Image (cartoon, rainbow, N blue to C red):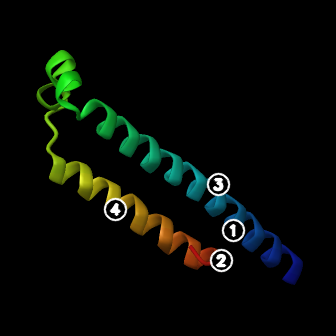
Amino acid sequence: MWSIEFDSVKLVKKTLRSVNWLLFFVAFFMWVFFVFFGSSQFRSLFNLYALLDLSWSSIVDCFVQILIIYGLSQELIGEPP
């Protein structure tokens, strides 16, 4: 019985670790994408802000929320962020 609980804890930790890497890469590529396409020449070419209806505050909010979730899940795993 104890080994079953221990295996499930290991599975949850492994899943959270995978989700953490996914969140990290999503946040990183989101940051690169909007910094790269946020320059004036790309904004005039693609007009992403009108197309996606995004503002800088919503981008920053999403980025911060991803980092908060990443930090909290690292605490659940037991590793420092």
First in sequence: mark 3 or mark 4?
3
Position in image of residue 51 (x %, y %): 16, 25
Mark 1 or 4, closer to the camera: 4
Residue drawn 25% across the image and 55% down it? 60
Q: Nearer the viewer, residue 1 or 71?
A: 71
Whether the residues at callouts 2 and 1 have beta carbons within 8 Å, the answer is no
**How crowded is the residue under tag 4: few (<14 C-alpha within 10 Å), some, or many (20+)?**
few
Identify whether 25 is placed above or below 63: above
Examine the rendering and report whether any part of residue 30 can be seen.
Answer: yes
User: How far, Cα to Cα, is label 1 from label 4?
Assistant: 21 Å
Q: Which residue is mark 3?
A: 18
Disc 3 to disc 1, C-alpha distance: 9 Å
**Mark before the other along the chain sequence, 2 or 4:** 4
52 above or below 22? above
Question: What percent of the width, then of the height, locates residue 33?
Answer: 36, 35
Q: Earlier in the sequence, mark 3 or mark 2?
A: 3
Q: Would you name the residue on which mark 1 appears? A: 13
Up-down relation of residue 34 to residue 17 (above or below):
above
Q: What is the quadrant of residue 49 in the picture?
A: top left
Point 88% across, 78% down: residue: 3
In space, the residues marked 2 and 4 are separated at their CA atoms by 19 Å
Residue type beneath disc 2: Glu
The mark nearer the N terminus, 1 or 4, is: 1
Q: Which mark is residue 79?
A: 2
Residue located beneath label 4 in the image: 65
Report how far apart the C-alphas of labels 3 and 4 lie in the structure: 18 Å
Q: Which mark is in front, 2 or 1? A: 2
Taking depth in this image into account, of 8 and 80 the one nearest to the observer is: 80
